[in-house]
Amino acid sequence: MDIRKVCIYCASSTIIAPIYINHAKTLAAEMANNQIEMVFGGSRTGLMGILADEMNKLNGRSIGIMPNFMKDVEWHHKNLTEMIWVDTMAERKEKMIEDVDAVITLPGGCGTMEEFMETLSLKRLGLFTAPMIILNSGGFYDPLIDLLEAMIRENFLSEKHSQMWEVVAQPEDIMPAIIRSKPWDSSAKSFALVQ
């Protein structure tokens, strides 16, 4: 599989543990060194800002996507390959996953969870088909993984749906996980309903 462009969901918070920062820097190096373009929320702060800064240092390409209202408070990163302005948060999410080869979810808050869950719902319906990788830095996403497994166990998702995502513990494992991801296509809508 040829990985050209990935979407990353992650935190804008600046008060975070060093493990999350280090993992973001490592991932940025992996992308830049392999000429993989990054699409992200466009913020200058938190893991988003760290990813963009590292990509810049290594001559990587970064595309930020942000709603216009965030411009007023200068949340946007001002040194990206490209900044795309949209009108709404919904447009932002739609644009972020357009023509990407994978979605990678790093630790984050409610915005990160919203993005991840919406994309997962689209994948369940066969409307998004690229690999989805969860970077479980330091066990941060253990509760989410437990919840996803409970959804399967309690028949809110089927066993087949466990193939929609893959969990890795280290940023170096992300690209191999994307490459080995099981194929997914629009036929997923045929088993979206658990019955």
Image: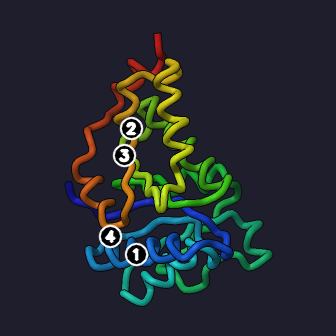
Q: Is residue 132 left or right of residue 48?
A: left
Which amino acid does the dot numbered 3 rest on? Glu
Q: Three-letter amino acid code at disc 4?
A: Ile
Q: Please state which of residues 153 and 182 is positioned toward the viewer in this rendering.
A: 153
How far apart marks 2 and 4 lie (CA) works out to 22 Å
> Which residue is identified by label 4?
36
Observer-nearest residue: 8 or 138? 138
Measure the C-alpha gap from mark 3 to mark 2.
7 Å
Q: Earlier in the sequence, mark 2 or mark 4?
A: 4
In terms of secondary structure, where does tag 1 sit? helix
Q: Kindly indicate the quadrant of the structure image that contains residue 66.
A: bottom right
The mark closer to the camera, 1 or 4, is 1
Label placed on residue 166: 3
Which residue is label 2 attached to? 164
Identify the element where label 4 is drawn. Answer: loop
SS at badge 2: helix
Dot 2 amino acid type: Met
**Separation of marks 3 and 1 at Cα, in angstroms:** 19 Å
The reply to whether residue 154 is visible in this rendering is yes
